[in-house]
Image: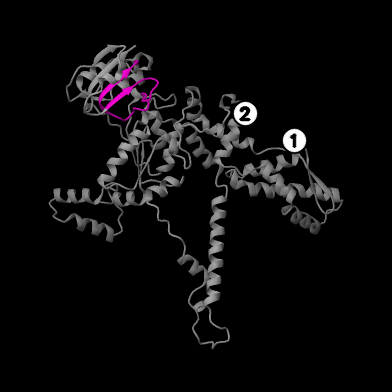
Amino acid sequence: MAQDNPTWGYRRIHGELLVLGIKVAASTVWQVLKDTGIDTQRERLSRQGVLVVGPNPGFLRYIGEVLPSLGETDVVFATPGELFPGVRTEREDTPELQALKGGLAAVDLLVEAIADRQELPAEPIPIELEDVTVPLTAEIVEQARDRTRRAELKHNEAQPVFHRALVNALVAPALELIGLDWPELAADVRRELVGHLDVRRAVGELWPVLTPRTLLADLYAGRCFALGYPELHRDDPHAWTVSDVPLLDEAAELLGSDGRAERREAEERRRAVEYAQGVLHVIDTDQAMHEDELRAVDLVNADWLADRHTAVDHRVLAERAAADREWTYGHVVVDEAQELSAMDWRLLARRSPNRSMTIVGDLAQRQAEAGVRCWHRALDPLARDRWEYRRLTVNYRTPAEIMAYAARALAEVDPTAVPPTSVRHGEPPLEVTDADPESFRPPTGTFAVISPTGPLTPRASKGLEFDTVVVVDPERMTPAERYVALTRATQRLVVVRN
């Protein structure tokens, strides 16, 4: 049963067994699954964690307070602007830039930006060998670059290939300048070129190791002009926006590792082994002792000792997952999913290779220019024939009177949309002119004022609800913003028109 239904936990299996007339304790089901090595969904989630993506920090704070009380601690909470480690931003691009950065064409833009960093020298670079000085010309570099690109490696991982190709391309002109073409001499020249400082420096300039941030910052700082994207220029290239986050993640995929983490890990390992060797040397007994005498070095070696004393990562799963760009989650939950761009969906697909997701969204509430307009177009590229659409037709939050009022804004967004059916009734909305919103604050219950300029804007209110809501200047909002603002109230709605 567990193998045929891999998403079921042991409690679901226990319930199904009871339905079939098989009486067994839930703990017994868990133990049997454990003993037979069959993974349950609960165990997978406890190892990989859950990613919850919400529209704003306020929504995530509320969810974050609720889930731990239910025993869920292996959960990472993030807004779309926090899905790349080390970046936290709520800054928004203009609608035009959102469309440019959010569409799938942005992948080609990044490929162009990377290719632009695989450069040709404007002037020949002199490589001073022992016998001659070889000019590193644009033609030689282009030959090496073409050969490297044919290897179809990620940019950073291809740098050593470019280095070898450059060395091989320089051997022939070096021999021509020397005036000899002996095989032994060619081998000597190649060895000299491999370790030559000028060659290494040229490799670093013509095929630099790049980080995602460096690539995008340089693009925004000025390289965008030569590539034909002047609208990407900005004065502070490091002022990351929400739309930059999936580009940073995509760039990381295209660039590959810059080697820093691997070098740091190797250096830490080298130091640990070196320290362990010193410890063994200190505690080792006299070499002159009898050969049958048992010594510490007869039992352990430096590698084993270093492994035993490797520092343990005591961070909880959520902390480790949030800091690791390559972490893959057991399940991903997305609220207000209609705001995500095609590039956002590519990022989430990398975080969830098994495509185990719960996605909640309302196309009528879409405000992002690059957001979802059709669920099939958004999800088919990621999980064709593997996703199921369910329309929620019952409204438990908004009273029928308020929903009927908000339905006018919904009709402006989509004339064919059918409002959900409210199960509760309450006060009809109150419309006033030039009134102080604070005058409607009730003595008890939650209260919010939503206006186009804030502090609580329609976008910032997404996913939230309040007992009493005052909406100011709804005519200055877009229909989608107006629909969001009008549906935040659970009891009373006041509309202030100026």
Residue 450 falls inside the magenta stretch: yes
Asked whether residue 50 is in view, the answer is yes
Under circle 2, the secondary element is loop
Residue 96 lies, in percent from the top left, at: 50, 22
- Rendered residue at 31%/54% (across/down): 39
- Indicate the quadrant where residue 222 lies: top right
- Indicate the quadrant where residue 391 lies: top left
Amino acid under disc 1: Ala
Residue 469 lies, in percent from the top left, at: 27, 23
Amino acid under disc 2: Leu
Query: The C terminus is located in which quarter?
Result: top left
- Rendered residue at 71%/37% (across/down): 120
Asked whether residue 334 is in view, the answer is no
Q: Nearer the viewer, residue 319 or 128?
A: 319
- Rendered residue at 75%/35% (across/down): 122
Q: In screen coordinates, is 224 left or right of 494?
A: right
Highlighted range, magenta: 447-473
Residue 479 falls inside the magenta stretch: no
Under circle 1, the secondary element is loop
Mark seen at residue 122: 1
- How many numbered badges does the structure rendering display? 2
Q: Nearer the viewer, residue 483 or 414?
A: 483
Q: Residue under circle 2?
A: 227
Estimate how packed mark 2 is, as few (under 14), some (14 to 19) or many (20 or more) residues with alpha carbons within 10 Å.
few
Query: Alpha carbon of mark 1 to alpha carbon of mark 2: how far?
Result: 18 Å
Estimate how packed mark 1 is, as few (under 14), some (14 to 19) or many (20 or more) residues with alpha carbons within 10 Å.
few
| Mark with earlier residue (1, 2) | 1
